[in-house]
Amino acid sequence: MTPKIAIRRALGLGGVIAVTVVAGTAFARPPFTQEELEQQMASLYEYAQRGYDLWHGAEPSMTSNGLACGNCHPDTAASNPQTFPKYMIMYGKVVPWTEMVNWCIENPQLGKRLDVTSDDMTAMQAYAMYLHRGLPIQPGLASEQTASVPVEFGTGFKREPTGLGVDTKEYVSERY
């Protein structure tokens, strides 16, 4: 094959690829439809609700003394999931947020740790991370704490209010 023929073939192949890319881009749909986005948000809120319930004592196996995560960390205060992984003195190494949750379940709460791959742990993460959304992700030392999450009423995420205590009106985010 002569150099002239090789160049023509390369340009021809390049032209086909360029047309394919341009046509594919022109006819591509957005990553998600509005309906798909709404379904995804509904699923996230469902997990956040389960996480809220677990955080406030809905799972008896997580405690044997009546304590729940919410007793020490109301509205996930000072749990700072966005600062993990970080070095924790009690472990002598860097650990993920899920391990710190399990430490609290086993020690102050005297309960049975959650499987870190379980839906319950994912729900706990969904609740804590949702309330901490928008805060800077800064892995660091255990002594570095962020300000508490502002939750004026209710759970801090969209759901139907229970009508109990201060949970009487639908949450409307002022941050987003």
Image: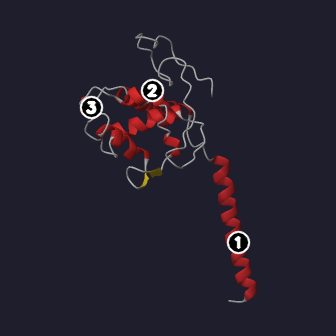
Residue at the spot 73% in from the left edge and 78% down from the top edge: 8
Is residue 52 among the parts visible in the rendering? Answer: no
For disc 1, the neighbor class at 10 Å (few under 14, some 14 to 19, many from 20) is: few
Q: Which residue is mark 2?
A: 74
Badge count = 3
Contact check, label 3 and label 1, Cβ < 8 Å: no
Upstream in sequence: badge 3 or badge 1 = 1
Residue at the spot 46% in from the left edge and 37% down from the top edge: 79
Between the C-alphas of marks 1 and 2, the distance is: 65 Å
Q: Quadrant of residue 135?
A: top right
Helix, strand or loop at label 1? It is helix
Give the vertical position of 128 relative to 166 (above or below): below
Front-lying residue, 105 or 19 = 105
Find residue 127 and report its horizontal and vertical position in percent.
Answer: 45, 32
- Give residue 63's mark: 3
Helix, strand or loop at label 2? It is helix
Front-lying residue, 16 or 128 = 128
Identify the amino acid type marked 1.
Gly
Between the C-alphas of marks 3 and 1, the distance is: 69 Å
Front-lying residue, 55 or 22 = 55
Query: For the view shown, which residue lies furthest in the right direction?
Result: 4
Upstream in sequence: badge 2 or badge 3 = 3
Upstream in sequence: badge 1 or badge 2 = 1
Identify the amino acid type marked 2.
Pro
Mark 3 or 1, closer to the camera: 3
Q: Which residue is mark 1?
A: 12
Find residue 18 and report its horizontal and vertical position in percent.
Answer: 70, 62
Mark 1 or 2, closer to the camera: 2
Helix, strand or loop at label 3? It is loop
